[in-house]
Amino acid sequence: MDERIIRGGAGAAQPHDSAHLHVTGAADYTDDIPEPRGTLHAAVGISARAHARIRSVDLSKVRAAPGVVAVVTAQDVPGENNVGTVKKDEPIFATDLVEYVGQSIFAVAAKTVEQARRAALLALVEYEELPAHLDAASALAAESFILPTERLVRGDAAKALAAARHRLQGGFTIGGQDQFYLEGHVALAVPKEDGDMLVYSSTQHPGEVQLVLAHALGTEATDVVVECRRMGGGFGGKETQPALIACIAAVAAVKTGRAVKLRLDRDDDMVMTGKRHDYVVRYDVGFDASGRIQGIEFQFASRCGFSADLSGPVNDRTMFHADNCYYLENVAIISHRCKTHTVSNTAFRGFGGPQGMMAIEYVIDEIARSLRKDPLEVRRANFYGVGERDVTPYQMRIEDNIIDALVGELALPASADYFARRKAVHAFNAQSPVLKRGIALTPVKFGISFTATHFNQAGALLHVYSDGTVMLNHGGTEMGQGLFTKVAQVVAEELQLDIDRIKITASDTSKVPNASATAASSGTDLNGKAAQAAARTIKERLTQFAAEHFKVAPSEVVFRANRVHAGAQNVPFAELARLAWFSRVSLSATGFYRTPKIHYDRKTFTGRPFYYFAYGAAVSEVEIDTLTGEYRVRRVDILHDVGKSINPAIDLGQVEGGFIQGMGWLTTEELWWNEKGELKTHAPSTYKIPVCRDLPEIFNVKLYGAGRNQEDSIFRSKAVGEPPLMLAISVFHAIKDAVASVGNYELSPRLNAPATAEEVLRAVEELRSRHAASDVRSGPSAVPA
């Protein structure tokens, strides 16, 4: 092996740091942490009504149940009975009003999990039911909003629409999605001396859980430590939601003076916790003969639930991504944030961006069908340009546009061979009366950074021990995405050490304070830069020491492949660390990073909210059965831009996983509430995430070879957590294309998401009916919601 190469540096396809623990079952999650002696187990008593006043709560049977040690209600909360951060509108325990089925009213602490859960079912609650809004459409009609309606406007959309040669109006619905992490919500609260509290929480945001806990317990942030070594998946569902679970456990721990663990089972988890926002979308678009958009108006109405949670920034990002890859010169976007009497929706991978992209891609497809053009032709006609037509509706100039080149490469015969396969699909459909195929190519442009500018910061802590080993800690959290591995690779590269010399440690609010959530695809960007800064600080100290010790110029000190060269001399890194320790050189450092260039005025929706964009494109081909609505994904080809990859193996895994999760959102994953506001799809038996048999028969995924971040990101890489999810929009449009063939491509299908088999069959039958009854020569009609 070349002595200049270290094991596991930047660019290496390094295995996930916990992969061997995952596959052997040895990885410790929050529920696996050894419980202190006398630990109690909690269960939550939840509302059975969507919207009601609480007339009375009789907990006498609960208290008398076997094994019960304590029952906690709002009266037992020492501080604020609230877990809402944006607005103080989400109680830990409801008092006189409940606003969704599943809202917490009380909790039980018992000697065993089973005793606690059985006891929680014995409460007698008397309700006075109130009218409830259970979906976005009814809330919009009643003007029930959790936050003010927002508008983003550029140009004069109304004037452009009036002057356009062609015009379409319509709408559709986009379903929500449950995060369905393998590990459900769980927290273990351990009282410490002098009123301190240690909480192990499965959370993407330990810092926020720490602050919410301090407020709930009536203490200060310094009195609470929150730790998380790893999560069994998060996907946004563990950004704000863990605070409630941690608070319930901690309040019970304060009341009993004993450690308390709360672990939700899958049914309670799905009923009690927030999901991806579902939307009702309306559009009005004017365009020319080439399909180029001249003016467009969007109306988004999202189901936010009973409290604000993160609905503000989620809906903001929908507005920011309603352009996707397309230049919209005259645009007006109205965003309604609807209050409903359902669980408060929250962050989910993509954070509102997928819904915005779905809207514009739907419109582009409608334009293409009305003009009888290949949708890819219309997409490329509307792409942002380079040096012109390159300013977003929120006035950010796109300086890194590669989408046309990337799409062009993907469409080539040597790659997805899009044009030849499209002809083959049409030929197949012409001779197949029952089975129909469809194909679609859709692009992705996703902005990277938190839109709340102050979250774009990170800290890290680095210790070099006298034996040359390194301990790494930073504010990011590991949820299976490989963040800890990538940041360790950054440190390995900077110090030129094999990665097995670096110990990765749990996220801990007592080590790195005020950390932002691991979200917005920014984990590696932020924490990698912070860790790099800490490593460079120590490296600079060691360089200065080595120069003095070996009597050479600092420029002659070089770190390379586990050794340090000082002029003609070289020593192992471990030896230099030992010598520096003897000479009283500090071998510990913190690092800090704040994203440059970004600025954003939310009052005007203008500025540069994103540091850069990540790009990608996918071609999907499907086959549907027009008699049943069932379908299969035959082939998927993906080309995705991750810049200069820090870890190609992890990045490929993120692209593959993100795509499949997005495919589930748009096809099989259907959330359904009944007329009482009860979520009936609350378990794997009724809520269908993709499984192995749903994978495309042919699944080709490549990282874009020409990619390199022009911004000074960590080693010129690009974020990869969220952008690939939107590649799955191609599956939805391939299904829509297959349905269109039923009417000989003369009408546009009225297809909503998720495109379940039932929805596909409904769209097929509806299209057949319209095709038989209408004069189709004028082209497809609009698609109403």
Image: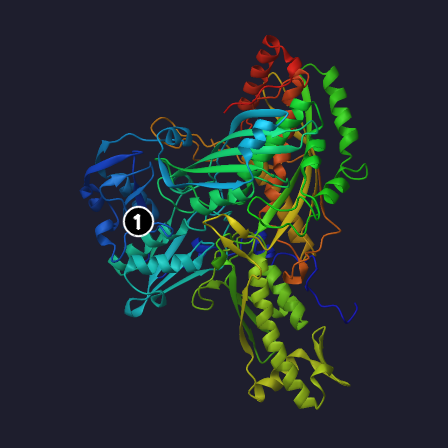
Above or below residue 201? Residue 537 is: below
**Residue tagged 1:** 92
Farthest residue to the top: give it. Answer: 773
Nearer to us in this view, 455 or 694:
455
Asked whether the viewer can see residue 505, the reply is no
Q: Residue at x 44, y 55 (%)?
A: 30
Q: Position of residue 737 (x, y in %)?
A: 65, 25
Is disc 1 placed on a helix, strand or loop? loop
Q: Position of residue 618 (x, y in %)?
A: 68, 38
Farthest residue to the right: give it. Answer: 414
Nearer to us in this view, 293 or 215:
293
Q: Quadrant of the N terminus?
A: bottom right
Q: Residue at x 59, y 65 (%)?
A: 529
Q: Amino acid at mark 1?
A: Ile
Q: How is the image coloured?
A: rainbow
Q: Position of residue 669 (x, y in %)?
A: 52, 33
10 Å crowding of disc 1: few (<14), some (14-19), many (20+): many
Above or below residue 325? Residue 670 is: above
Above or below residue 731? Residue 387 is: below
Nearer to us in this view, 165 or 511:
165
Asked whether the viewer can see residue 212, the reply is yes
Q: Position of residue 703 (x, y in %)?
A: 71, 48
Q: Residue at x 34, y 47 (%)?
A: 113
Left or right? Give the position of 425 relative to 476. right
Q: Quadrant of residue 751?
A: top right
| Total numbered labels | 1
Left or right? Give the position of 336 relative to 702. left
Left or right? Give the position of 372 relative to 208. right
Left or right? Give the position of 554 relative to 506. right
